[in-house]
Image: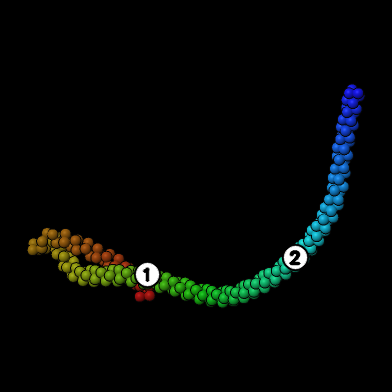
Amino acid sequence: MTSQKNIEEQDEVVVIEERDKRTHIYIAIAAVLGLAFGGLAGSVLTANKWESTYQVLEDKYQALAQDKTALVSQVKTREESLDKEIQEKVDALLAEKDAAHQKALKKLQTQLTEVEKVNLSLESQVKQQNDKLSSSKTENEKLTRQADMQATMFERSREVFQKELKISQDLEALEKEREKLLPKIDKLKKECDVFLEGKSWDVKSDACDKHDEANSRLSQIDQLIEVYKMDLKQIKEITSDMGL
């Protein structure tokens, strides 16, 4: 009995243990199923919440994208407007500068034309002055040559006149000497003849020598007189050629 009782007790223990094991399994399965169903429900709730949030974010993103597109369009329009405005201002400034430059250039060309006229006038005046100076120089050179010629002629005429005066004086002296020598020669000739004839002892023995000397001097004087007369004639021709 005891053995059978022990066996029954052991069987009960085994049954209880098996039951406990199955209970644990059921509990585990139930827990897993609970978790699965809970997770699925949570996932569904989470997915719905995420989809809603995503849609909000998508709407915000689209709004931001539209705002960005509008802003880009506005910026582009503003840039184009600014570019156009700047270009217009630049064109206006360039036109103003070009007009001022053209005005200044025209003024400068007018001044340059006036300066060229003045230069032409000055060149004409300078040419006239140069012509006058050249003419004056030529005239001065001519006057200088004339003065030099006149000085030369004056010097030469002075020399000629001095020579003429000296020759005339020498000629006059020779003629006077000749006039005095002629009677002396006649006297010495007579004395020489008397001496040669021996008619008188009062005549000196050198009478003939003195007669010869007097004749020689007379011949010399005559030659000099002829030479001086020729010189005077030549001087007269020279003075005539010189217009004196």
* Residue at 67% in and 72% down: 89
* Residue at 20% in and 69% down: 177
* Residue closer to the observer: 102 or 188: 102
> Picture quarter containing residue 203?
bottom left
* Residue to which mark 1 is pinned: 148
Q: Is residue 210 left or right of residue 107?
A: left
Vertical position of residue 141 compared to residue 41: above or below = below
Vertical position of residue 36 compared to residue 105: above or below = above
* Residue at 38% in and 75% down: 243
Residue lying farthest to the front in this orientation = 1
* Residue closer to the observer: 206 or 151: 151
* Residue closer to the observer: 34 or 83: 34
* Residue closer to the observer: 240 or 220: 240
As drawn, the label of residue 71 is 2
Q: Quadrant for the C terminus, please.
A: bottom left
- In the rendered structure, which disc, 1 or 2, sits on the residue that comes first in sequence? 2
Query: For mark 2, does the 10 Å Cα neighbourhood hold few (<14), some (14 to 19), or many (20 or more) residues?
Result: few
Whether residue 44 is visible to the viewer of this picture, yes or no, is: yes
Vertical position of residue 154 compared to residue 10: above or below = below
